[in-house]
Amino acid sequence: MKLKTKLYLGFGLLIFLFIIFQLFLMMLMNQLNTNMKNAVDNYEMAKTAYKIQDSLNWYRSDSKGILANPPADLLKEFQDHKEQSYLEANQAIETLRKLDKREKSQKVIAELQSLSIQLRAIEAKTNKLMEQNKDEEARNLFWYDTWDVIDKMTSDATYLQTLQEDGVQSEFELSNDTTSIAYKFIFGYAVAVLIMGGAITFFILRSMSKNLNDVMSVFTNAAFGKGDHLPRIRVKTKDEIGQISIAYNEMAQVLEKHHKQEIELKNAAEEQSWLNTKIAEIATMYPGINNLKELAQLFITRLAPIVGASCGLIYLKEDNVFRRYGSYAGQEEPVGRESFSVGEGLVGQCALDKRPISLEDIPEDYIKISSGTGGAPPNSILVIPAEYQGEVLAVIELASFKPFTRLEQVLLEEVVSHLGINIKSIQRHIRVEELLQESQTMTEELQSQSEELQLQQEELRTVNEQLEEQFKSSEQKTHELEKIKNMLEEKAQQLMMSSQYKSEFLANMSHELRTPLNSLLILAKMLSENSGQNLTPKQVEYAKTILSSGHDLLRLINDILDISKIEAGKMEIFLEKTEIQEIKASLKSQFFPLARQKGLDFSIQLDPFLPDLIQTDPQRLQQILINLLSNAFKFTEKGRILLQIEKAQQTVFSEEKGNNLVETMIAFSVSDTGIGISQENQKLIFDAFQQADGTTSRKYGGTGLGLTISRELAQLLGGYLTVESTVGEGSRFTLYIPSLQIVQARLEAAVTVEEPQPDIDERESLEGMKILIVDDDMRNIFALTSALESYFVEVVFAENGREGIEILQKNPDVDLVLMDIMMPEMDGFEAIRAIRQVPEYMNLPIIALTAKAMKSDRKKCIEAGASDYISKPVHMEQLISIMRVWLYR
Amino acid sequence: MEKLISFDKREIEKIEINLLLEGIYRLYGFDFRNYSAAFVKRRIEHRIRTEKLEGISDLQQKIFYDPLMMRRLFYDFSINVTEMFRDPSFFLAFRTKVVPILRNFSSIRIWHVGCATGEEVLSMAILLHEEGLYEKTKLYATDMSEAALVQARKAMMPLNKMKNYTKNYLETGGTSAFSEYYVARETSAAFHPFLTENVVYAQHNLATDQSFNEFHVIICRNVMIYFNKCLQNRVLHLLHESLSASGFLGLGSKEGIRFTEIANYYEEVDSDEKLYRKIHP
């Protein structure tokens, strides 16, 4: 029997018993309920029976009352009450009749009903008698008939009551009986069910657990981990346990099979993994190797121990010959043959067949593999070709003491196939490297050639330029020469005339100018003396002013005459023996009064070694010295003025010194403690009409010709003039003249300035250029224009981009554009782009003016097409530099 | 004798050149023996043509007895082709890739090998100035030609090249205006003297002289193209020795260290611009 069936039966029986028990209990309850209801009914009926008695008693007493002849109001009450009692009694009887269906009761009730009717009839009689005032008769009727009827009725009612009470009693007894029966039944039933349930449970449990235990013991004994052999369960029953056993047996079988497969797979995987590891081991050595020798040696060194070979050789193809490239465990040096050609020996044959060759049973003396402890011939030899795309690139020979296993052979095949690819790739790599090196060398060579060419081009260009220039200049020179020749001829003519004119003019000048001036001076002097005493002090002052101005004018005229004479070469020098003492005396008498007047210390010192006489022009010498001393007095407010006359030291050197070297010279130096001359002005003061600075003339007066004349005169005398001065401390002018030899030739001033004053020259480089300034700020335009015009640059301007383009169209000869970037209407970027779109302006230099802070703008300028940029505010020097660069042709 | 006559003319020429170079080395101490053969040949031929000489032996005669001829040939060998910010992309790469690293150094030494007339040194000075590194940098500019160095010290550039230099300057990512660095005169532009204040100009011959300091950056552009492999390797070793650990090496656009002996000691900072960084001593 199945386990399921057993369980169904067992539990089904118990449920069945429980249902029966339930039904029985329900029946009992019902019974008890009925008993209770009957008892209550009987009790109700007993109460009704009592009610009848009670009502009859009231009837009796009310009737008695009425007969007693009561007052009228009470009579009425008695009559009503009596009527009511009668009705109640009748009602109770009726009720009882309906409730109690028992025959015994019904008989009594019927009797009661008939008695009640009888009572009514008697009453009616009585009432009639009463009305007829036959009280006696009425009383008799009452006391006998009525009373009797009521007694009968009361006894009947009492009987009925007793009857009902008996019913209640019997019902109680009945229910008591029922309860006791119920108790007995419940107890008996419970015991029976308990015994039965226990028996069923025990039976089921016993039959199940026994089979399960059998199965479990087998399960526990089965070691699933090992899985090669599992215990089986003997199938005894056909129930579920039996089915489990069958299923388990099937599973065990499957598990055993699976386990076997797993072991096989594991072995295969291990082999594969070994294979892969070894292949990878060999494959990892390839990267980084880029020469075949290294590759071959490394390959055989790695491969031989992996396959257990005791000796190995590798031959690589090299122009149809297989050359040994590497060996493993060779004992003699070198191992094996150096090379094989295709088809020669086993190695050659292997290369020819492209198939491995395997040798077993090697003769004793074939080859010996030796170690420190001994040596023996190998057991087997394997020769394998390494191919790449059908071409044998290498042959490997391996010798081993044991035969090569299948796995090792697989490994060899695999590894060797990779070798072919790698040999090829290295060969290619080497080739590529060679080519790259070659190309690198060639690139460098090209670069050097290109640089040389560039240099030569440069040289050529320079030469070309020079030639061109030379050509141009020679052409020009010829032209000029022609012109000059003509001009010279003309000039010569003119010169003759003009020199004549000039002499005449000068003569006239001296006469025509001086005569009126002299008269003017004399008259002014007379006026200032005021001999007539008729002039006001103011007028005297005016006259004095005319006098002093006239003197100045006269001096100026003299100076101009002097300098023009010198420049015309008309100044004549008359050399004669001159006494130095005489000069001293003359100067002393001339300047001492002035020194006293100004409160200055003036002295003249003479060198004791001076010659008494010198050969010079005393008049010119004096003129120079007077000039120098006048200047000294003019520029000195306090202190002293010293004239030293001495033999010149050899160390005294002047950059203005000419070529005529004179051994001994006389130096006249005038030193003062005046205002001094700054270093840069020292050069200027000798130039005509120059004074130390512009303010000097205003303060000190003078023509500025004195030093020029002095210098020229000094040169005429064969000497020169130098100056040393410190601002604020004083100056020292020294005149050097030769003491013995007199050089008459006029000296060429050979002043070479190291760096020519850039100003005028430099300005010329931009001369004639036309520049367009585009800027919305009129002040900028004005500032730039006035600065650029001093460089002789022609400037046109526009106030915005659009206008700029228009101006440019009207002035196609513009050489360069200065373009402000931030402008209304059309900004600089746009304007530059627009200009660049015109093909003729592709190469027009455009310099953008950007604000210094706007670094990003600069990039935009260049992107828009500007050639260069310059930051605002513009530095003139930088702008000129930029213009030079971009205007350079 | 028959055999002698049948000698290849080129072979003879080779021998003549070798003899001439050997002679120059012994007599004047200039070592051109390891210069690129093709280059030497071309320069010698150029000199022969210019001087209207018979041949190499004729030139040899002149060289040995006339130092002026030697000087002229020497100038033939020193190719001073250069320009400011030559290959602007190189300077741009230097600005973007090397300068950020140089910022961390407290002082920087840069060696311009074969500086010629100093254009690139000046360019580097400008670049460093713009990057705020110039103050702490010392630039060593060397060349074998004293005449080139004289020119370099002047820091004057011909005006006709300035347009191109301005263009180059803009392409190197200049942060200022190029015109701020020079004052243009009639025919040349004089560069601001502060740009040469931190520059040491000195004569140095790669073929014969040794290292003289350790540098953080060495620029040797288009110098080794005139050398043969042997001298190239010697120079590279010399530069390698002179370069500090993690120092930078800048070569010419057509040069490279890939096939040289020092290839493995460097990593590429910018392969196109031939900027390398030393990674192994």
Image (spheres, coloured by chain):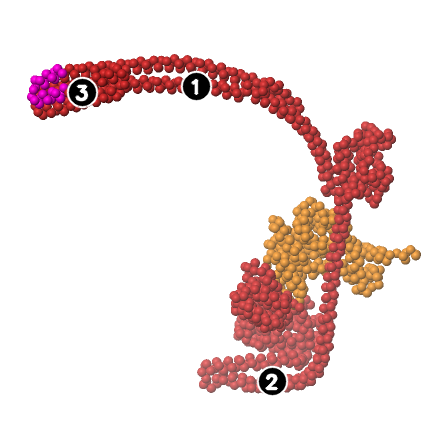
Q: Residue at x 79, y 59 (%)?
A: B42
Q: Is A21 displayed left or right of A881 in the figure?
A: left
Q: Nearer the viewer, mark 3 or mark 2?
A: 3
Q: Is residue A137 magenta?
A: yes
Query: Label 2 marks which chain's residue?
Result: A
The quadrant where residue A58 appears: top left
Q: Nearer the viewer, residue A564 or A366?
A: A366
Upstream in sequence: badge 3 or badge 2: 3
Mark 2 sits on what residue? A509
User: In the image, which lettered chain appears red?
Assistant: A
Q: Residue furthest left?
A: A133
Q: Quadrant of the C terminus of chain A?
A: bottom right
Camera sees residue A360 = yes
Q: CA distance from mark 1 to mark 3?
A: 61 Å
Label 1 sits on residue: A18
Region of the chain picked out in magenta, as a range: A122-145
Q: Give the orange chain's letter.
A: B
Q: Quote the CA–CA distance across marks 3 and 2.
A: 206 Å
Residue on which disc 3 sits: A117
